[in-house]
């Protein structure tokens, strides 16, 4: 029997991600205030008119009491959000533990945690159990809200177990899964104790998506080498059932950035920044403070550049804006103090009474301040050691129509595949090379800057977040239709 599809323009999309795109603050026993965080994914999906998106995820707060849970669910419903309630212990084991301490570093080639072996094994098992339990809790909520004809789009490494749980509830549910991080070489993935179970549960989805063709290829290799399944150009086949695997490079809502540059507040802010740094070239880094972003390497390369180019010392400034994340994790605290120490040393070494070479801010900037900063920058430095895509590089390009600044970009960011022709690509581990590329960027002729910028700007403008979401969902719809056709034949 065939399911009657809803008219395409009213199709409901259930977007399942670890975090809901809101921050919730409790104001009283049964009252909450909510703020929508306008991240990339939110604006991507808001821009898509063909379907009506609902969000399912954790609200980021512990709500142990029923009164609070009911009130929060009601408030969230107005924003088309549906909460999954996770208690503190689960969050600790699933989110801090398995997601952030095991999968995140592993997928970025930093390996598994190296502590005492026995302790690791014990905690690994309980963290994996919590991971599966949390994914099952997400599945319960999805299943409760699912209506025939909906499509379900699961996001990221937090929810690799979800496709299997959902298909167990309802094998006809259209399920897609997209990974925002890299998928590493199969040789890295095979070190993970739960390697097979995770691959199998992802394969339960109808469509599996990655940012780049390389990540998709790594995933298919992991399935062939670890599970012994057959890889085809379309995806992975298991006993006649095909899971489609493909690349869907994300983009940004470029018009939002371009429009922002015409807002009076932004223009005013740009003017202030230009006055503040008059006579100096502005270099910019914007990252979450995470080991994968290669922040210490970037700052050391800047130091080397100053060391070797005395004439530039009072003519260039590096603004490094790093939002602290996962601040309760010791490795992240260590990284923060490491960065502070290097910045302090360099400013002590090359600073003068009136100016320092590095301004380092440990905080997030609001959207308009960020746009102004992107627009006045001469050279942006994105030196991730690994990065699924890296949207900062896209945002910078979107704000550079007037200035046509230079992007120095790590070859280990997914964005290197799309912005590589316009950027100066570097190996972020090679400090000498990055230092030399800073010189190349600062000395580049206007003609060459223009040519490189034009290439990148065209890409950023045409490959938007909206197009990304539309492509993924329409392909997800198609795969299911194909599978149904196969069954009905
Ligand atoms: P992230 O690792 O968070 O995302 P990125 O893609 O660069 O990395 O996105 C960061 C976002 O946060 C950008 O929109 C940026 O503007 C914002 N941001 C960063 N620092 C900020 C600051 N100091 N102030 C204000 N805003 C700041 C993950 C993957 C990426 C992948 C995305 C999307 O790690 O590789 O590109 O998901 O799939």
Image: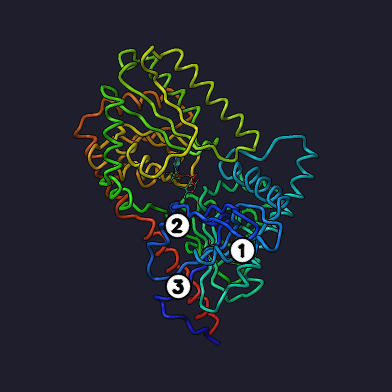
Q: Are marks 1 and 2 in contact (CB under 8 Å)?
A: no
In the rendered image, the vertical position of residue 364 relative to residue 200, given as above or below: above
Residue reaching furthest to the bottom: 1
Q: Which residue is mark 1?
A: 71
Q: Which residue is mark 2?
A: 42
Q: At 68% across and 45% down in the image, what residue appears?
A: 97
Secondary structure under the numbered disc 3 in the rendered image = helix
Residue 251 visible to an observer of this rendering: yes
Q: Marks 1 and 3, how far apart in space?
A: 38 Å
Return the disc, 3 or 2, that comes first in the chain's sequence.
Answer: 2
Q: Name the side, left or right, on which 314 lies relative to 7.
A: left
Return the disc, 1 or 2, that comes first in the chain's sequence.
Answer: 2
Return the disc, 1 or 3, that comes first in the chain's sequence.
Answer: 1
Q: Which residue is mark 3?
A: 478
Q: Nearer the viewer, residue 379 or 79?
A: 79
Q: Nearer the viewer, residue 234 or 368?
A: 368
Q: Residues within 10 Å of mark 1 (few under 14, many from 20)?
A: some
Image location of residue 127, percent across then percent down: 72, 49
């Amino acid at each position: 029997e065939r399911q009657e599809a809803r008219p395409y323009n009213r199709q409901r999309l259930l977007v399942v991600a670890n975090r809901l795109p809101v921050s919730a603050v409790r104001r009283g026993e049964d009252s909450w205030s909510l703020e929508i965080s306008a991240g990339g994914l939110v604006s991507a999906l808001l821009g898509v008119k063909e379907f009506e998106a609902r969000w399912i995820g954790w609200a980021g707060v512990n709500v142990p009491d029923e009164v609070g849970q009911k009130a929060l669910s009601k408030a969230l419903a107005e924003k088309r959000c549906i909460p999954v309630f996770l208690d503190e212990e689960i969050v600790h084991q699933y989110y801090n533990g398995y997601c952030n301490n095991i999968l995140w570093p592993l997928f970025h080639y930093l390996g598994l945690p190296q502590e005492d072996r026995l302790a690791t094994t014990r905690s690994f098992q309980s963290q994996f159990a919590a991971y599966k339990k949390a994914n099952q809790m997400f599945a319960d909520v999805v299943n409760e809200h699912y209506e025939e004809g909906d499509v379900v789009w699961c996001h990221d490494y937090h929810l690799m177990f979800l496709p299997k749980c959902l298909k167990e509830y309802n094998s006809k549910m259209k399920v897609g899964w997209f990974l925002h991080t890299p998928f590493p070489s199969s040789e890295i993935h095979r070190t993970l104790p739960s390697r097979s179970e995770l691959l199998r549960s992802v394969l339960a989805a109808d469509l599996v998506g990655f940012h780049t063709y390389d990540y998709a290829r790594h995933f298919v290799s992991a399935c062939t080498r670890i599970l012994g399944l057959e890889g085809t150009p379309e995806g992975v086949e298991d006993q006649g059932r095909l899971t489609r695997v493909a690349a869907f490079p994300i983009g940004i809502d470029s018009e939002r950035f371009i429009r922002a540059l015409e807002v009076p507040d932004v223009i005013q802010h740009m003017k202030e920044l230009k006055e503040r740094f008059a006579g100096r070239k502005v270099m910019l880094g914007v990252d979450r403070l995470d080991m994968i972003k290669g922040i210490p390497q970037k700052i050391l390369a800047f130091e080397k550049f100053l060391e070797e180019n005395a004439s530039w010392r009072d003519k260039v400034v590096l603004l490094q804006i790093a939002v602290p994340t996962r601040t309760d994790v010791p490795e992240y605290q260590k990284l923060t103090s490491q960065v502070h120490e290097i910045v302090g040393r360099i400013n002590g070494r090359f600073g003068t009474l009136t100016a320092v070479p590095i301004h380092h801010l440990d905080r997030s900037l609001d959207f308009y301040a960020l746009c102004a900063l992107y627009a006045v920058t001469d050279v942006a430095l994105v030196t991730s050691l690994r990065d699924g895509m890296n949207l900062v590089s896209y945002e910078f390009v979107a704000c550079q129509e007037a200035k046509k600044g230079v992007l120095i970009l790590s070859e280990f960011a997914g964005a290197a595949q799309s912005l590589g022709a316009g950027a100066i690509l570097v190996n972020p581990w090679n400090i000498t090379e990055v230092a030399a590329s800073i010189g190349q960027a600062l000395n580049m002729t206007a003609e060459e800057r223009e040519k490189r910028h034009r290439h990148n700007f065209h890409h950023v403008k045409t490959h938007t977040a909206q197009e990304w979401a539309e492509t993924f969902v329409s392909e997800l719809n198609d795969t299911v239709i194909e599978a149904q056709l196969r069954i009905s034949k």
